[in-house]
Every structure is written in C-alpha cells, then in structure tokens.
Amino acid sequence: MPKNDISWRRRSPAGEKVELYAHHVGSIWNFYTRGGRYDRWQFTPQPPLEDWMALLDGVERLIARDRMRPEEADRLRKTMRERFPDAKV
C-alpha cells in the first residue's frame, strides 16, 4: 500500500470485520473495502460518514507527523460538508 494511502478497520452493520483504505488522487479520495485478508479490494462509490470521519482522523495524524500538508484537512472537511450537509465536521 503506498504511503499516501490511509487504512483502518471497522465492523459492518452485520457485525463482520471490514478493512478499508482511502487513496488520494489529485483532489479526490477513493475508498476501497474488503472483508478479509485474502479478499479483493472493492471500490466503494458512496462511503458513509463514519468512513469519512475515520479518514479525517488519519489525515490529521499525518499532518501532525509532517507527512501531509495542513491544507489537505481543510479540503477534506469541505468535501465532507458538501456530501453530508447535516453533519458537524
């Protein structure tokens, strides 16, 4: 997995473990999921707010380590506000 990818794990609504990662391409973020270690990564066209919040947490951690520019968190928050206008970001 490239260095600019951010990955995390969560439980699906059915209670199964799911691995996720987000790949930064230009000004957009592509999300991918898989159920287990040997499953293929599947593109996720409309990730839920929970995944966007996990991505924002990962971006803020990279900014603290000087591995990502601070403007990226602002761009990500703007994208999240556009996709989820009712959410407090």
Image (cartoon, rainbow, N blue to C red):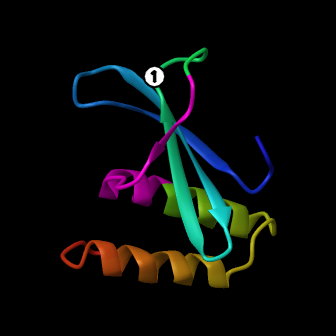
Of 87 and 79, nearer the camera is 79
Judged from the image, the secondary structure of the residue bearing numbered disc 1 is loop
- Apparent side of residue 62 relative to residue 31 in the rendered image (left or right): right
Q: Is residue 89 visible?
A: no
Q: Is residue 60 above or below residue 45?
A: below
At horizontal 34% and vertical 20% (from top left) the residue drawn is 16
Across and down, in percent, residue 67 comes to: 80, 65
- Apparent side of residue 46 relative to residue 26 in the rendered image (left or right): left
Q: Is residue 43 magenta?
A: yes
At horizontal 56% and vertical 70% (from top left) the residue drawn is 28
Q: Is residue 71 visible?
A: yes
| Identity of the residue furthest to the left in this view | 86
| Identity of the residue furthest to the top in this view | 38
Of 42 and 84, nearer the camera is 42
Q: Is residue 23 above or below residue 86?
A: above
> Which amino acid type corresponds to the residue marked 1 in the rendered image?
Gly
Q: Which residue is mark 1?
A: 35
| Crowd class of label 1 (few under 14; some 14 to 19; many from 20; radius 10 Å) | some
At horizontal 56% and vertical 63% (from top left) the residue drawn is 29
Of 63 and 16, nearer the camera is 16
Quadrant in the picture for the C terminus? bottom left
Across and down, in percent, residue 11 comes to: 35, 29
Look at the image and give the residue range highlighted in magenta.
Answer: 40-54
Q: Is residue 71 magenta?
A: no
Quadrant in the picture for the N terminus? top right
Across and down, in percent, residue 61 comes to: 65, 60
